[in-house]
Image (tube, helix red, strand yellow):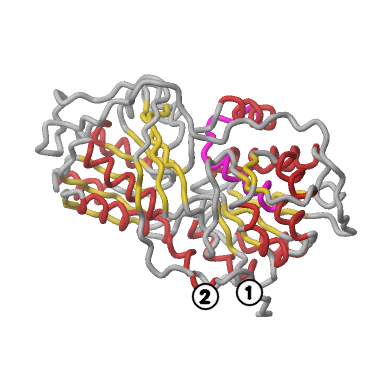
C-alpha cells in the first residue's frame, strides 16, 4: 500500500475516551409518556416511566444563515473539478438509511454548485450502493469510485461495511467521510489522517441511552445485540453507562448479520425478566419486535437505537410500538431543512443522518477551498481548520465567502456543532431521543448534548 503524508497528528489519537454529558433537554411537541400504572410482564419494576418532555419548541441545529446574495469568485481555480463519491446503502439491512443520506448529499452538492462550486468548477457526485456485510457490494463500489477519480467518498453508513473498505479508500490517498459510522474503533484506526465522520462515536450514544433507561426507572436491562463492530461496541457503552447509574444488565444475547430466526434470543431475554430491553439491531427489529410483543413485552419497555429507529407504519399493526423509544445521534431535523430534502426526494419518510451527510459535503468543499486543491490528502489537511475557531457560519455560501476574503471560517451545520478532534471525530454532538406513536412512526421528544 502506498503511503501518503500524515495529515494532522494522528499519532496522538486517543486510546481511551473520557466523556462528559451535559443534559440539555428540549421538548419537541407532546408525547404519550408511559405511566407507572403499566406493569411490564418481564420485569419486577412497576413500569417504565420516562421523564416527560419539557415545554417549548425544539431543535438545536444551527440557525438558518442570512441569505448570501453574492459569493466572491474563487481566488484560485482548478483544472480538475472536485469529484465526490457516495457509498451509501440502497440495498441490505440498512437500506432505510440510504434515502435521507443520499438526499443530504445531493442537497449539499446542489447548494455548493449554486454558490459557484469549488475553485471555479461545479462539484461532481457519483453514487454507489454500499450493500451490507453479507455481500461484497461495498468493495466493488469502492473500486468503481476510485477508478473514476474521486477525492472523497461519503460513507459507508454501517461501521461493519466501512471496516471492509477503509484501507482500500485511505490507502489510495482518498478521504473516507462517514455520516453514520459510530464504532469507537475508528478513533484509533491507522487511516493516515484520511478517515473522518460527522456522527459521534457510540461512546456518546451509549452513555446517553444507558443513563436515560436508568432515569426511566429501569433497574435491570436485557439486550439483543447484532454481533458486529457497531452492535457490540454500542452495547458495551450502554452497559457501562447503565451499570454506572446503578443498574444491572441481566441478559445479553447476540445474533449475526444474515440470521433470520430470533426466538432463542427473545426467549432468553424474557426469561431474565428485565425492566427494559435494548434492541441493538438493524432491520432485524422487524422480526424481533413481534416476537417480543407476542410474548407479553410492552412497547414501553423497548429502547431502540439509530440502527433501527425507523418508520414501521407499514410493518406493524397500529399501537405495536406505541411508547417505545429510540436514540439517533444528531440534533432534530429542522422544518426548513426537511422541506429542502423533500424537494430533492419527495418520498422521504426518515431523516436520519441527512444532516450529517449534508454537512460532510459542505466540509469537504470548504476544506478544498481552504487547501486550494482537490487532492484528497490536501483537503483532509484543512478539515479540522474549517470546523473550529474563526467566524461562525452555517452554509457553504457564507463560509466560502469568509475563506475567499482571507478569513477563518468555522462551519456549524445541520447535524449540530461540528468541531473535529485530531482523530477526525466530532468532539461534541447531540443525541436525539424519540418516542413511537400509535401509527408506529416516531416523534422527537428531547435531545441531549455531550462532549467527547
Q: Nearer the viewer, residue 198 or 260?
A: 198
Name the residue located 55 percent from the left edge and 48 percent from the top edge. Answer: 418
Mark pair 1, 2: CA separation: 9 Å
The answer to which of marks 1 and 2 sits earlier in the sequence is: 1
Q: Look at the numbered discs 1 and 2 and tell me whether their residues touch, using CB distance below 8 Å.
A: yes
Residue at 44% in and 68% down: 14
State the image coordinates of residue 169 (x, y, percent, origin top left). Answer: 64, 66
Question: Looking at the rendering, in which quadrant would you find the C terminus?
Answer: bottom left
Question: Label 1 belongs to which residue?
Answer: 6
Give the secondary structure at mark 1: loop
Residue 11, label in figure = 2
In-image side of 173 versus 414 (left or right): right
Q: Determine the residue positioned at 62% across, 60% down.
A: 176
The quadrant the N terminus occupies is bottom right
Q: Tell me if residue 172 comes above or below residue 150 in the rendering.
A: below
- Membership of 398 in magenta stretch: no
- 101 or 135: nearer the eye? 101
Is-magenta flag for residue 363?
Answer: yes
- Which residue ends up furthest to the left in the rendered image? 44
Magenta residue span: 345-364
Q: Is residue 148 visible?
A: no
Residue 314 image position (x, y, % from top left): 46, 27
Residue 99 placement (x, y as % from top left): 60, 39
Amino acid at each position: 500500500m502506498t503511503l501518503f503524508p500524515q495529515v494532522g497528528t494522528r499519532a496522538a489519537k486517543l486510546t481511551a475516551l473520557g466523556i462528559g454529558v451535559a443534559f440539555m433537554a428540549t421538548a419537541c411537541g407532546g408525547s404519550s409518556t408511559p405511566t407507572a400504572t403499566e406493569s411490564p410482564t418481564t420485569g419486577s419494576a412497576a413500569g417504565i416511566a420516562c421523564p416527560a418532555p419539557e415545554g417549548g419548541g425544539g431543535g438545536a441545529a444551527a440557525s438558518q444563515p442570512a441569505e448570501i446574495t453574492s459569493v466572491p469568485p474563487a481566488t484560485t481555480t482548478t483544472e480538475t473539478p472536485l469529484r465526490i463519491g457516495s457509498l451509501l446503502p440502497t440495498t441490505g439491512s440498512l437500506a432505510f438509511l440510504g434515502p435521507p443520506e443520499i438526499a443530504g448529499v445531493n442537497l449539499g452538492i446542489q447548494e455548493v454548485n449554486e454558490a459557484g462550486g469549488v475553485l471555479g468548477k461545479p462539484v461532481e457526485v457519483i453514487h454507489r450502493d454500499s450493500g451490507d456485510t453479507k455481500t461484497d457490494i461495498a468493495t466493488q463500489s469502492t473500486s468503481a469510485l476510485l477508478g473514476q477519480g474521486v477525492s472523497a467518498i461519503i460513507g459507508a453508513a454501517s461501521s461493519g461495511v466501512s471496516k471492509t473498505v477503509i484501507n482500500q479508500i485511505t490507502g489510495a490517498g482518498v478521504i473516507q467521510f462517514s455520516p453514520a459510522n459510530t464504532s469507537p474503533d475508528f478513533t484509533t484506526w491507522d487511516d493516515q489522517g484520511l478517515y473522518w465522520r460527522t456522527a459521534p462515536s457510540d461512546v456518546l450514544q451509549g452513555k446517553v441511552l444507558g443513563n436515560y433507561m436508568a432515569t426511566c426507572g429501569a433497574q435491570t436491562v436485557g439486550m439483543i445485540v447484532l454481533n458486529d463492530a457497531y452492535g457490540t461496541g454500542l452495547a458495551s457503552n450502554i452497559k457501562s453507562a447503565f451499570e454506572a447509574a446503578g443498574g444491572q444488565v441481566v441478559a445479553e444475547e447476540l445474533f449475526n448479520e444474515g440470521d433470520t430466526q430470533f426466538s432463542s434470543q427473545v426467549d432468553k431475554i424474557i426469561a431474565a425478566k428485565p425492566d427494559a430491553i435494548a434492541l441493538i439491531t438493524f432491520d432485524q427489529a422487524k422480526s424481533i419486535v413481534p416476537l417480543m410483543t407476542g410474548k407479553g413485552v410492552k412497547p414501553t419497555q423497548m429502547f431502540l437505537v439509530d440502527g433501527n429507529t425507523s418508520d414501521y407504519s407499514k410493518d406493524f399493526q397500529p399501537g405495536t410500538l406505541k411508547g417505545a423509544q429510540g436514540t439517533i445521534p444528531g440534533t432534530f431535523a429542522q422544518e426548513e431543512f426537511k422541506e429542502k430534502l423533500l424537494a430533492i426526494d419527495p418520498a422521504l419518510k426518515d431523516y436520519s443522518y441527512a444532516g450529517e451527510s449534508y454537512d460532510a459535503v459542505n466540509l469537504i468543499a470548504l476544506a478544498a477551498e481552504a487547501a486550494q486543491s482537490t487532492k484528497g490528502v490536501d483537503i483532509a489537511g484543512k478539515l479540522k481548520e474549517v470546523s473550529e475557531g474563526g467566524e461562525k457560519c452555517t452554509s457553504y455560501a457564507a463560509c466560502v465567502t469568509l475563506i475567499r476574503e482571507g478569513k477563518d471560517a468555522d462551519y456549524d451545520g445541520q447535524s449540530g456543532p461540528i468541531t473535529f478532534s485530531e482523530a477526525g471525530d466530532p468532539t461534541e454532538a447531540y443525541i436525539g431521543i424519540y418516542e413511537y406513536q400509535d401509527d408506529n412512526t416516531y416523534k422527537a421528544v428531547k435531545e441531549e448534548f455531550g462532549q467527547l
